[in-house]
Every structure is written in structure tokens, then in C-alpha cells.
Image (tube, rainbow, N blue to C red):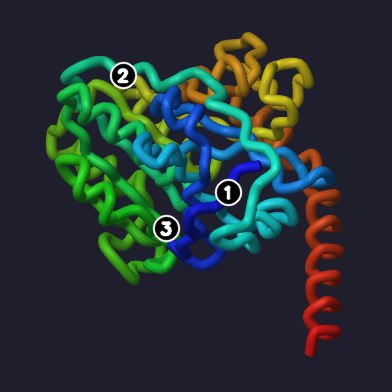
Amino acid sequence: MHRILSKEILAPDVVRFWIEGPHIARKRKPGQFVIVRTGEDGERIPLTIADVDKIRGAISIIVQGVGKSTRQLNALNEGDAILDLAGPLGRATEIHPGRKVCCIGGGIGTAVVYPIACGVKALHGEVVAIIGGRTRDLVILEKELRAAVDQVIVTTDDGSYGDKGLVTDALKALLAEGRHFDEVVAVGPLPMMRAVVEVTRPLGIPTTVSLNPVMVDGTGMCGGCRVSVGGEQKFVCVDGPEFDGHQVDFEELNARLRAYREQEAESLRLFDQATLCRSSQAR
């Protein structure tokens, strides 16, 4: 069992937890993740390790409640316990000293680029972070990034905060100014990552994306997280989660992400119905 040390609401339906996990905190490197299970009947949820506190022996995860399992997780509070916390899993980010990197986070993807950006700075790199959301309420980790990197640019789709537009608009503006990057790292919704890749591809800028398909065991045995990269089959849990964005088959990945959409919607409907019923009985 792993005790929740603290819980903080970062945005609507977005929660940051600090959880006991000393063995993970000691070994974790930027880019790695954990698989969380709240109880015996719970789904296994892959989540990026957003931060670590080695002194407390704790790790931080940031969870967006979009389905039954993530909503169940976000309903937990400080002092509650999580049954399983497996990790660190996946390959760590490949970071080269002294590089100029643009880290782009869309929505909850900012939780993934944050530790990568910190890792680049730790090796004396230069980092520009572009983070975005549909509206101001959905922009996360701005303060933390401003304290860690060289420049932060915020965009919102509706113009309610920062620059009006998409993260790709900000990237295009930087490149038009003549800014040079050795690498771009993009994490967020699939259409966003794909759009970033199409901006960098003609310019030949190496671009890394972090993928989060359906994942079960985290060891490469189930095959649920397979993706096509450069015409080869890869397993995100052991070969990733980061890949060359110019080589990823986004069409295939999108189809796989949609495969269980109906079942996920039905599971969430039943969960919401049960939650409403319990709430009515408690009144």
C-alpha cells in the first residue's frame, strides 16, 4: 500500500498527488512512468512521474479525470492509500548536455514535459517551454516551469490567457524569428503532437513525442500498447514511451486509441450513475 501524502487541485478535473514510493523516488529518471491501481478490481493506469522528493521518499503524479478509473483515483484524498504503484517503468529520456530544446506541452501533457525540461536544465541545456490549453483554467505547471527553464510561452485556444492560438503557432513564431533548437519535445493530445511534427519535419528538427496508448502489464507481454514506428512494431511500455515523432504512424495509433471508446463511455456512465445514487442516499 502507498499512502497519499498530499492532494492539490491544479485545474478542473486535474489533480496533483504526492504519494509514498521511496524505491521509485530513488531510481526514477525523466521520462519514466508508473502504473497505478487503486484497488483489487481497479484498472491499471499508466502515469508519468512528474516529480520526486528523495528526502520524503515520494513521487508526484498528475491525473486528469476523464474516465472511470482516473475519476476514482482523483476521488481519493490525503491519507488514503493506493494498492499498487509499479515503477519506474519505460526508458528514460535521452538527454544530451548543453543542447537547446523546445519543450511543448498541451494540456495534461505539460506534466510530462516538465520533468524532461528539468532534466535538460540539469545538464546545462537551454530550454524554451511552450504550454497551452483550451482556456486559462486548463494551463498547468506554469509557475514550476518559470522557476526551472529559460523561457515560458503560454497559449490558450480562446485567448483568455497568454497568446491566443495553438502551441504550434508559438513554435512557428519562434522559428520565424530565427530561433534554433537542437530538439523539440512535444507531449499532449494526439492531434497536437502530430501538428508539431508536421511543423518540424520540413525543417529537419529532431522531434520527440511521448505516447500513452492502452497499456496493461507494463512489461511488453500483453501487446496492448504496440505502435508502428519507422515501419516497425514497438511496445510503448518497454521501448518508449518516447519515440521519434517523424517516424510514428499517428493514423494507426489514433485508431487503436479509439478501439474501446464505446466500452469506456459505458463504464463511465455506470460509474457516474452509481456515484449519483450514493450521493442521493446520503442526503
Q: Where is residue 78, by image quadrant?
A: bottom right
- Left/right placement of residue 232 relative to residue 10 reads right
Q: What amino acid is labelled 1 in the image?
A: Arg
Residue 39: x and y in percent read: 76, 47
- The reply to whether callout 2 and callout 3 are in contact (CB within 8 Å) is no
Q: What amino acid is labelled 3 in the image?
A: Gly
Q: What amino acid is labelled 2 in the image?
A: Ile
The image's mark for residue 3 is 1
* Residue behind mark 2: 95
- Left/right placement of residue 216 relative to residue 122 reads right
The reply to whether residue 194 is visible in this rendering is: no
Number of numbered tags placed on the structure image: 3
State the separation of the CA atoms marked 3 and 1: 31 Å
Up-down: is 171 above or below 76?
above
The image's mark for residue 133 is 3
- The reply to whether callout 3 and callout 1 are in contact (CB within 8 Å) is no
Mark 3 lies on a secondary structure that is: strand
Label 3 or label 1, whichever lies nearer to me, is 1
> In front here: 173 or 90?
90
Q: Earlier in the sequence, mark 2 or mark 1?
A: 1
Mark 2 lies on a secondary structure that is: loop
